[in-house]
């Protein structure tokens, strides 16, 4: 239990790092969009590649944050019924819920890996006013899905051992 | 034999009413008729099962049996079948582009092998219409294009637009209406029927007949296993339907384009402006344009087809 | 087993899983994936899972959602909520139910800078709830009026949910955003009327405010609202007069509120940039997680034939088209009890949108109508996300039951607004139709 707690904390610190990177990225996208408009109106020279960079940034932003959101209990659920259950049953339901998340996202990560590998094999490019390889973004999506699967697995073990979840940012619904 | 209901997955909304949607329905009806009601196709319209970018994977894995693949979205996955897209402008019209694709598939097994590798089979080809440039201001020559912001997408347009002295701006299809309206772009490459379909002609009133040619287009594709599992008779029906489809589609497309041009003369008030062909051909030697063409030739050579020879199909006849 | 039956089992599984306390995102994705596997095979289901996450997010359009959210969070840091609430209470505090009315109008104004109903409900719970409770307002009236006022941020542009509708139905996002402006204002007024009438019937719910502000104080408070006027001009006028596209409006709006926050705190330190960014990306992840998994589920629903069966039944009914509107509304209200707004839109629009278009309704009008419907769902029990947010932001001063108990007049006001939209569609259509 103690070891698991340490593991969860370290893993959480890593997820926070990923989240911070995603946050920096959304801020950069904001600046890019503003720069593009400014350059268009002031100099009739829009920033080349605004669309391509913006659309490739979004998957990175989302998938670097999914697991962190789960760690903070930010994904919506309904505990209307489960909070009325006796302790043991409630714990079982919680383990089941976390395992369900693990199964889905492990499956999705596996599927995402195959797509990313295929994209890498054909050297897939983002093609527009600028060009760059798109497969790194696909691998990042897969990585984010895997991070989320691991978080669900940690949470499942945690719940099975009787660990409690804080109500995080207050978005867990009761 | 048992009766089969096949699934067709498409991005096209059922009510779209354009040549693509109308002829998809035609094909489905013909299939039922020609198999004498034995087999049928159920269409899942509007991306309800798979969106444009998901269709090749979905089809390949058997989510559906039939589907339309927007080829230019997959230049790295399907380089050979994307040949036409690397050669803008080129002289062929819609029907000719469709026939070109049929000829390529009949002549070079590499074209269908590229699809078979993805567990796909193409039984028909749906080219797009002849493209010109729809603009918010009159453009009469290449000189008028200098400094214009022109919508670009795909792999050939950016370099071509730069070669013409304009700046390419990437804009999503669904944002192009607002971009034209707000002067974020001055022009977009498009044909009359699509311009009407997306209502771009409400906000851009000059259609410049830049002879960009027809582009390709959509593969009418099948899951390879579903195709192979058909009995000989049904497979024969599909093979023939693919050929007949091109003729029917080209007919509906021409009708559409003619109807739109009538509307333009009337209430919509879109002015059609001729454009000197030599102004366009003058930039074909541009290094950027040539680089895109050479990219395809390099890829295709590596895949074992006589690329230089095929590329000659895209040469404009030198004016005598 | 027939596909329709599998579809039916899937729908039952969805509700069962949600009630078991599994994340809504996970239930949608898992039922969808297993459903696909049972209809077209495991390989096919895996292929869909492999593409849907990347392809849905690899989109220029969708980047407007985190930008709108960022704008809302910066607006919070810039203290726009405080300023607006202060200004509206000075002017309207003395009315019957004046604090609740001030909250509603303040939230409507704040909605012009925030794209999320949950965010707005949070801000005004922190600002207005303590004030109302300290002055003896009824807990149910106070908390419920904040929960519903949050939904105004979704009607008034910017709005993440309206963007979701636009993308799912291929409608013009610019026109949709502008279309929500007037209905948002009208709905705010309808809600004020509901508060006024509720207090008129039972004056004990809200003691009259005795402190009066001088005209000078009132006029001075208008200055506080200045920055917001700037934002409204930027966003609404920018979209309406055609200076930039919706995505650009998101970027510029976020940047403008960022500058306001920096000015307010005289530097970056007070803006808590890292925290703001983390809040933005986590809310974005929550929305996209639900949205993508809802898409997996809706693919399954489409393939199973359930979607076609429901849509076909609706379209085939030989009744007046307004009866269909009523049926569609009831479906949304029923599902809205259970489900979160983006998920609800992703699952239902492939079914209802074609039906409504066949009946000749305007896609922009239907967008506003349906957004109002799912936002009513955002307050109705048992799953009323705005109520959860108000309760959890109240630091234990109100219970969930108390929030729900106060909702009746506001849900009725929501119905009145729906009827108003049907009777006078021009409320939604006037601005987009006159857009430059
Ligand atoms: Na808003
Ligand atoms: Na609800």
Image (cartoon, rainbow, N blue to C red):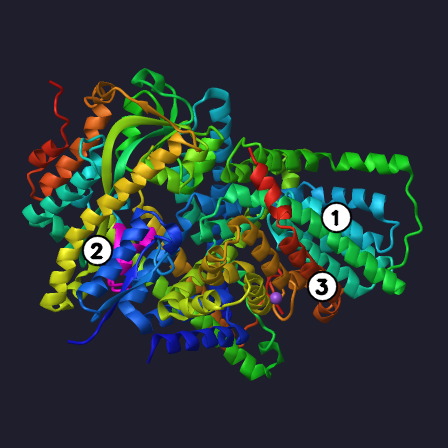
Task: Say left or right for C122 vs A26.
Answer: right
Which of the pair C263/B100 is nearer the observer? Answer: B100
Residue B54 is one of the magenta-drawn residues: yes
Q: What's the CA distance linking mark 3 and mark 2?
A: 52 Å
Q: What's the CA distance linking mark 1 and mark 2?
A: 55 Å
The residues colored magenta run: B52-69
Place residue A131 in its image quadrant: top left
Instruction: Say above or below: A84 vs B86.
Output: below
From the top left corner, tell me how far across and down residue B241 is, in percent: 17, 56
Task: Say left or right for B55 vs B308.
Answer: right
Residue topped by disc 1: C105
Identify the mark at residue B221; answer none if there is no mark.
Answer: 2
Mark 1 surroundings: few (<14), some (14-19) or many (≥20) residues within 10 A: many
Q: Chain of mark 3?
A: C
Residue topped by disc 3: C412
Which of the pair B221/A101 is nearer the observer? Answer: B221
Residue pictured at 64% horizontal, 43% vertical: C113
From the top left corner, tell me how far across and down residue A16 is, in percent: 50, 53
From the top left corner, tell me how far across and down residue B111 is, in percent: 12, 48
Residue pictured at 64% horizontal, 53% vertical: C421
Please count the marks in the image. 3
């Amino acid at each position: 239990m103690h070891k698991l707690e340490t593991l969860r904390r370290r893993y959480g610190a890593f997820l926070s790092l990923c989240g911070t990177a995603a946050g920096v990225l959304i801020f950069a996208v904001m600046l890019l969009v503003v720069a593009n408009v400014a350059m268009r109106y002031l100099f009739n020279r829009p920033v080349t590649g605004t669309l391509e960079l913006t659309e490739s940034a979004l998957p990175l932003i989302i998938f670097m944050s999914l697991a962190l959101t789960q760690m903070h209990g930010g994904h919506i659920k309904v505990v209307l019924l489960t909070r009325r259950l006796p302790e043991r049953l409630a714990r079982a339901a919680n383990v089941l819920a976390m395992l369900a998340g693990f199964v889905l996202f492990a499956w999705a990560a596996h599927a995402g890996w195959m797509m990313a590998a295929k994209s890498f094999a054909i050297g897939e490019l983002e093609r527009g006013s600028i060009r760059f390889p798109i497969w790194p973004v696909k691998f990042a999506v897969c990585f984010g899905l895997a991070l989320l699967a691991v978080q669900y697995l940690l949470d499942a073990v945690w719940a099975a051992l009787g660990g409690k979840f804080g109500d995080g940012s207050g978005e867990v619904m009761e | 034999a048992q009766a089969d209901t096949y699934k067709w997955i498409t991005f096209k909304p059922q009510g779209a009413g354009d040549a693509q949607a109308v002829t998809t329905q035609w094909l489905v009806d013909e299939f039922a008729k020609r198999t004498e009601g034995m087999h049928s196709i159920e269409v899942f319209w509007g991306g309800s099962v798979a969106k444009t970018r998901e269709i090749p994977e979905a089809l390949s894995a058997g989510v559906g049996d039939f589907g339309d693949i927007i080829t230019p979205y997959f230049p790295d996955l399907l380089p050979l079948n994307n040949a036409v897209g690397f050669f803008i402008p080129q002289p062929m019209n819609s029907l000719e582009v469709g026939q070109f694709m049929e000829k390529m598939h009949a002549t070079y097994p590499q074209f269908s092998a590229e699809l078979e590798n993805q567990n796909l089979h193409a039984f028909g080809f749906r080219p797009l219409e002849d493209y010109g440039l729809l603009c918010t201001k009159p453009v009469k020559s290449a000189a008028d294009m200098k400094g214009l912001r022109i919508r670009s997408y795909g792999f050939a347009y950016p370099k071509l637009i730069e070669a013409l002295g304009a700046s390419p701006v990437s804009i999503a299809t669904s944002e192009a209406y607002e971009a034209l309206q707000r002067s974020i772009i001055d022009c977009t490459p498009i044909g009359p029927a699509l311009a009407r379909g997306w209502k771009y002609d409400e906000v851009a009133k000059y259609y410049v007949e830049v002879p960009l040619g027809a582009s390709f287009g959509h593969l009418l594709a099948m899951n390879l296993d579903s195709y192979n599992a058909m009995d000989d008779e049904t497979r024969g029906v599909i093979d023939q339907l693919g050929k007949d489809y091109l003729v029917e589609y080209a007919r509906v497309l021409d009708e559409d384009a003619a109807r739109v041009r009538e509307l333009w003369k009337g209430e919509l008030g879109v002015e059609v402006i001729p454009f000197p062909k030599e102004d366009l051909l003058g930039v074909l030697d541009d290094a950027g344009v040539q680089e895109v063409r050479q990219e395809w030739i390099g890829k295709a050579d590596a895949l074992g087809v006589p690329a230089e020879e095929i590329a000659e199909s895209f040469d404009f006849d030198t004016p005598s | 087993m027939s596909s329709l039956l599998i579809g039916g089992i899937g729908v039952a599984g969805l509700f069962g899983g949600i009630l078991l306390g599994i994340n809504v995102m996970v239930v949608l994705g898992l039922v969808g994936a297993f459903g696909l596997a049972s209809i077209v095979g495991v390989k096919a289901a895996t292929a869909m899972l492999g593409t849907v996450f990347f392809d849905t997010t690899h989109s220029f359009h969708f980047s407007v959602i985190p930008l709108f959210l960022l704008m809302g969070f910066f607006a919070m840091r810039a203290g726009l909520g405080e300023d607006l609430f202060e200004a509206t209470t000075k002017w309207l505090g003395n009315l019957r139910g004046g604090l609740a009315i001030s909250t509603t109008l303040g939230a409507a104004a704040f909605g012009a800078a925030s794209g999320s109903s949950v965010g707005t409900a949070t801000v005004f719970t922190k600002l207005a709830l303590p004030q109302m409770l300290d002055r003896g307002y009824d807990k149910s009236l106070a908390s419920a009026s904040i929960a519903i006022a949050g939904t105004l941020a979704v009607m008034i542009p910017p709005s993440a949910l309206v963007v979701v509708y636009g993308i799912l139905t291929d409608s013009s996002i610019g026109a949709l955003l502008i279309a929500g402006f007037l209905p948002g204002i009208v709905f705010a007024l309808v809600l004020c009327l509901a508060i006024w009438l509720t207090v008129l019937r039972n004056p004990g719910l809200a003691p009259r405010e005795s402190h009066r502000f001088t005209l000078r104080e009132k006029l001075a408070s208008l200055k506080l609202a200045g920055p917001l006027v700037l934002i409204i001009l930027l966003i609404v006028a920018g979209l309406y007069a055609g200076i930039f596209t919706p995505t650009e409006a998101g970027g510029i709006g976020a940047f403008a509120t960022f500058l306001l926050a920096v000015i307010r705190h005289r530097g970056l330190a007070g803006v808590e940039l890292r925290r703001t960014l983390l809040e933005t990306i986590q809310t974005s992840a929550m929305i996209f997680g639900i949205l993508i998994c809802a898409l997996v589920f809706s693919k399954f629903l489409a393939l199973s034939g359930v979607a076609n069966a429901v849509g076909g039944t609706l379209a085939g009914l030989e009744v007046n088209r307004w009866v269909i509107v009523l049926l569609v509304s009831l479906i949304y209200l029923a599902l809205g009890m259970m489900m979160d707004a983006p998920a609800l839109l992703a699952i239902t629009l492939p079914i209802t949108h074609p039906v409504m278009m066949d009946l000749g309704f305007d896609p922009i009008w239907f967008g506003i109508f349906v957004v109002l419907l799912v936002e009513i769902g955002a307050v109705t029990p048992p799953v009323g996300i705005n109520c959860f947010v108000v309760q959890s932001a109240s630091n234990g001063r109100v219970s969930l039951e108390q929030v729900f108990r106060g909702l009746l007049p506001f849900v009725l006001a929501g119905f009145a607004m729906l009827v108003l939209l049907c009777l006078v569609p021009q409320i939604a259509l006037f601005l987009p139709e006159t857009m430059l």
